[in-house]
Amino acid sequence: MKEKRKQFSNVFTYATIVVGLLVLLGSVFPDQFGETSGAIGNWITETFGWYYMTIFTLILFFCIFLGLSPIGKLKLGKPNDTPEFKTISWLTMLFSAGMGIGLVFYGSSEPISHYLAPPTAEPETKAALAEAMRSTFMHYGFHPWAVYGIVALSLAYSQFRKDEVGLISKTLRPILGDKVDGPIGNIVDVLSVFATIIGVAVSLGVGAMQINGGLNYLFGIPNNQLVQGMIIAIVTVLFLFSAWTGLSKGIQYLSNLNMILAGLLFTAVLILGPTLLILNMATSGTGDYLNTLLYNTFDVAPLNEQKHEWMQTWTIYYWGWWMSWSPFVGIFIARISRGRSIREFVFAILLVPTFVSILWFSAFGLTGVEVGQNVPQIFEMSPETQLFGIFNELPISIILSAITLLLISSFFITSADSATFVLGMQTAFGTLSPANFVKIVWGLALSAIAFVLLLAGGETGLNALQSAAIISALPFSVVVLMMTIAFYKDANRERKYLGLTITPDKKRMKEYMEKNK
């Protein structure tokens, strides 16, 4: 009996109570749950939109500063540690961990939506298309990866260099001291667990919607909450089986399969779509994105009603989603980044995924817009069926749709399986081998929350998902700010101790020159 108690911490108990109450309320009162979460989400976006924009921007600038400063010379690990994974494998895992389902779901639908209802331009014009690509690049570019990066940096530095347990709360020891081992630490870990559950549940809900949309378009299977619930149930059985048996190699194979399928899909769309336009707009759009980055990163459009409403639906929702996704992604990225220098880590995580996202959205977005201009019905489709409608107008449409369904399902399973491990780790004292019981509980909780959010979202489905992401991100953003301060305090102290500077130490340089004459 004593041994069983050690399998999970107080965080597990508190977090399961909170999640259980949410599932109960959402199941019994789905309409009221949806209305309440929507109202809270709207209030947060109206009241704290400026805060979300500011915190993401500050974190981005801080990451750039770290990469350029002497702190960048420090390792995420002991001085003699070497990277566990080859650079190519590491970069691939960085990207696959951070996006996944979102890329497939929004690959065409987001640029199309911005083209039809742009932030400031006239709809369905060349200016609207330019705005559509620039806005999409920003949502999947530097900002989300900076937040992922700072969470991962704090965890990796704390765990591998300072020998702390791999919990979010332990990264705050430089500013909270031993308080992280008590109730305050429990509160921080409960917040991180809650944010993780909501962030991953949003992705699972989006994935279920798109799988259902594809089955509806291809085979006429009804597109409704019952079918989406069945999809979630089937996938839940698959990833719970994997979590129970510990098929780490199977998940590794699935992760590699994800990248192969995504690469095949991207190559096919690039060739079958408007290839020259895709390449030109990817180049031009990148320049436009970089040129307007500073302005758009702070702009909350207080005097532009059109853009202000657009931002509540898109940018603020994304910032909430990415913030709530950051504990899960941060823990995963920290785990695979041992032995890397901070400078190498920062520039890799900012540049590589952003570059890949630009190519992906250029290919799928521009292909979607061009097909929609010729087949207007595409523009009227729901986001979850839009991609399959676009493929229907291209050669080898059945193959493309089949690959897409397989890719979403694979992302679904790997994300959920990885999330059960991360949640188990966060609620079992940071152990790298959480008990199966703990993983099963969190796997069921993830699926239950995803289905409840779909129920509460009504016909559109996305409403409650968006609200949940925005709500869960607000309290956890405070934790991320504290992690940023704690990491800098600790790393800068070590930089001073080691005498790391931008310019060489003149005294040491003179001694070195005399020694090596």
Image (cartoon, helix red, strand yellow):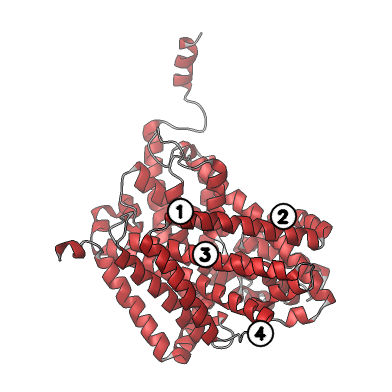
Mark toward the start of the polypeptide (1 vs 4): 4
Q: Which of pointers 1 and 2 lies earlier in the amino acid sequence?
A: 1
Q: Which residue does the numbered mark 1 point to in the structure image? A: 249
The first of marks 2 and 3 along the sequence is 2
> Which residue is tagged 4?
220
Q: Which residue is mark 3?
A: 322
Horizontal and vertical percent position of residue 195: 42, 68
**Location of the N terminus (image quadrant):** bottom left
Instruction: Specify few, some or many for label 2: CA neighbours under 10 Å numbering under 14, 14-19, or 20 or more.
Output: some
Q: Is residue 279 left or right of residue 431?
A: right
Label 4 neighbour load within 10 Å: few <14, some 14-19, many 20+: few
Q: Between marks 1 and 2, how big is the CA–CA gap?
A: 37 Å
Q: Position of residue 428 (x, y in %)?
A: 29, 61
Q: Please state which amino acid type lies under the numbered disc 3.
A: Trp
Q: Secondary structure at mark 1?
A: helix
Viewer-proximal residue among 118 and 416: 416
For the residues bearing labels 1 and 2, Cβ distance under 8 angstroms: no
Q: Is residue 444 left or right of residue 61?
A: left
Asked whether residue 123 is in view, the answer is yes
Residue depicted at x 40% and y 43%: 491
Crowd band around label 3 with a 10 angstrom C-alpha radius: few (<14), some (14–19), many (20+): many
Q: Earlier in the sequence, mark 1 or mark 3?
A: 1
